[in-house]
Image (spheres, grey):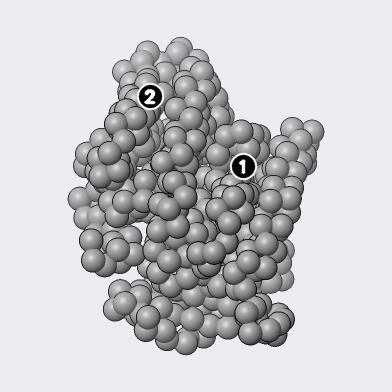
């Protein structure tokens, strides 16, 4: 493994942190405050992008921030706060850092359009959430991953409870309780036990090997695995998913952050990072942990899709769609076949661009019409063609229809299921696709072909502010581009299995 030590990793996580400080300092000048957000976002993306050639060349970029504890003995390595850029981390880091730039523009249009309160606090916490997310993306060991994971939980609580009403506080409380108790109750003890049995918390450099010695009892390894799968509750696996629909009380840019840019992606990223680089493909094969995990998350995929069908509130329908779609990532990795893993990992990026489009559209619709329910949106597609057109494109991606990005993910997941010889998983993927179509198609059909109410005709609704419409059109266009040209993110995923 060719390792390059580079302080750009530290600079990447400092950019949003420094940005948060500048946002607070300029809070009384909205234009300057938003410029600071934009500069921080562009800077972070620029630093992340500068690492792409190194990782594409097969190098692993590393930086040790500081040593927390020295080597205990010959069998137990030092505990460090350290960063790493490898193919897996770049999938998440590139998508999250780029989408933050578009979200800055969108948030400015949304928050000003509704004259929201506490906009400085909102922008500050947004930047801090990206600080935590990029820290998770570049974490070199389980301890670093855990610390940044908790930073994401704490910094996003004020965003979820932003409206400071009973509904906001209740949603925020549920959000914080679910995510912190699972992390502290499951991940922390698992981390301690992993260090005891393995002598290290550093991630392996190969997806096959993992870090757990072969002589550790299979029962202990299985228990640690279960703790890690359930402990990273941001991954939305049922029954620990209730925080996610509850968090929909937040402003729409926060929903976009939760569902596409940071929070849930931190959950699935952390889960697959541990599956591949702590336990490893070979050990999971040996203990038969792969297909049972795929079957377990299949319940979430199907059940969440069925629940989504019953939701008239657009953001709630999208929330349950997210619960379902997240488990595609874990299912693909759990298949333990190269194509299954590749399909799961590339879905991190594909889902991010498509789902943020859907939430951007929901926010634009609300700002322009103050409508939240699908049943009230009949005919609005004809007066808001850009917003609903982008919604239609992103819906095709969620369904898995060509030529949009989601088709690539589902195609590789199907190939992975075939390689694993699981007709049941193939059935789950086909059934979920039908359910996806069942809860997205009516929204699009009603918007473009439904009859507009007399009240809506009287109001003469138009598109939201361009600061909102342009970003959602861009993310929709990128979703299509990733369907035609999937190689950028796919090549990072394929690098995990160079011989395949």
The correct choice, above or below, for 135 with respect to 350 in the image is below
Please identify the quarter of the rendering in which residue 398 is found: top left
List x then y, in percent, for residue 19.
61, 71
Can the viewer see residue 455?
yes
Q: Which of marks 2 and 1 is in front?
A: 2
Q: Is residue 91 left or right of residue 190?
A: left
The tag on residue 251 is 1
List x then y, in percent, for residue 195.
65, 68
Q: Which of marks 2 and 1 is nearer the N terminus?
A: 1
Classed neighbour count for the residue bearing mark 1: other residues with Cα under 10 Å, few (<14), some (14–19), many (≥20): many
Q: Choose between 123 and 457: the one closer to the eye.
A: 123
Q: Name the element at disc 1.
A: loop
Q: Is residue 454 left or right of residue 107?
A: left
Placement of the N terminus among the 4 image quadrants? bottom left
List x then y, in percent, for residue 343.
32, 49
The correct choice, above or below, for 193 with respect to 343 in the image is below
Q: Residue at x 40, y 64 (%)?
A: 207
The tag on residue 435 is 2
Classed neighbour count for the residue bearing mark 2: other residues with Cα under 10 Å, few (<14), some (14–19), many (≥20): many
Q: Choose between 55 and 187: the one closer to the eye.
A: 187
List x then y, in percent, for residue 173.
76, 41
Placement of the C terminus among the 4 image quadrants? bottom left
Q: Residue at x 41, y 84 (%)?
A: 3
Q: Which residue is drawn at 21% across and 55% down?
A: 485
Q: Name the element at disc 2.
A: helix
Q: In this view, does 218 lie to the left or right of 276?
A: right
Mark 2 and mark 1: Cα distance apart in space = 27 Å
Can the viewer see residue 474?
no
């Amino acid at each position: 493994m060719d390792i390059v030590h580079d302080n750009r990793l530290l600079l990447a996580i400092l950019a949003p942190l420094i940005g948060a400080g500048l946002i607070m300092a300029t809070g009384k000048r909205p234009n300057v405050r938003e410029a600071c957000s934009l500069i921080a976002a562009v800077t972070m993306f620029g630093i992340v992008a500068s690492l792409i050639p190194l990782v594409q060349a097969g190098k692993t970029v590393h930086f040790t921030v500081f040593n927390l504890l020295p080597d205990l003995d010959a069998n137990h390595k030092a505990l460090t706060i350290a960063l790493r850029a490898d193919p897996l981390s770049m999938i998440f880091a590139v998508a999250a850092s780029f989408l933050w730039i578009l979200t800055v523009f969108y948030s400015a249009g949304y928050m000003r359009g509704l004259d929201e309160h506490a906009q400085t606090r909102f922008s500050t916490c947004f930047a801090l959430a990206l600080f935590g997310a990029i820290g998770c993306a570049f974490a070199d060991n389980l301890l670093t991953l855990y610390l940044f994971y908790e930073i994401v939980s704490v910094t996003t609580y004020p965003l979820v409870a932003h409206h400071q009403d009973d509904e906001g506080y209740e949603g925020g409380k549920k959000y914080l309780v679910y995510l912190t108790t699972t992390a502290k109750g499951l991940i922390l003890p698992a981390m301690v036990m992993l260090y005891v049995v393995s002598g290290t918390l550093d991630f392996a450099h190969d997806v096959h090997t993992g870090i757990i010695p072969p002589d550790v009892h299979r029962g202990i390894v299985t228990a640690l695995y279960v703790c890690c799968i359930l402990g990273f509750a941001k991954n939305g696996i049922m029954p620990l998913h209730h925080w996610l629909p509850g968090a929909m009380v937040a402003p729409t840019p926060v929903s976009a952050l939760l569902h596409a840019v940071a929070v849930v992606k931190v959950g699935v990223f952390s889960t697959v990072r541990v599956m591949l680089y702590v336990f490893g493909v070979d050990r999971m094969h040996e203990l038969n942990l792969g297909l049972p995990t795929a079957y377990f998350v299949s319940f979430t995929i199907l059940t969440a899709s069925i629940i989504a069908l019953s939701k008239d509130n657009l953001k709630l329908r999208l929330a349950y769609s997210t619960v379902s779609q997240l488990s595609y990532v874990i299912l693909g990795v759990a298949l333990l076949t190269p194509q299954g893993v590749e399909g799961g990992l590339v879905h991190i990026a594909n889902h991010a661009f498509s789902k943020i489009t859907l939430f951007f559209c929901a926010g634009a619709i609300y700002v322009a019409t103050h409508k939240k329910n699908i049943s009230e949106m009949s005919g609005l597609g004809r007066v808001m063609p850009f917003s609903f057109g982008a919604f239609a494109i992103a819906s095709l991606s969620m369904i898995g229809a060509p030529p949009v990005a989601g088709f690539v993910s589902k195609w590789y997941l199907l190939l992975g299921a075939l390689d694993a010889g699981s007709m049941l998983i193939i059935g789950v993927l086909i059934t979920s696709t039908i359910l996806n179509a069942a809860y997205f198609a009516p929204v699009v059909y009603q918007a473009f072909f439904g009859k507009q109410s007399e009240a809506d005709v009287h109001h003469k609704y138009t598109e939201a502010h361009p600061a909102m419409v342009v970003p959602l059109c861009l993310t929709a266009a990128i979703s299509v581009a990733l369907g035609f040209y999937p190689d950028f993110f796919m090549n990072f995923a394929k690098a995990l299995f160079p011989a395949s």
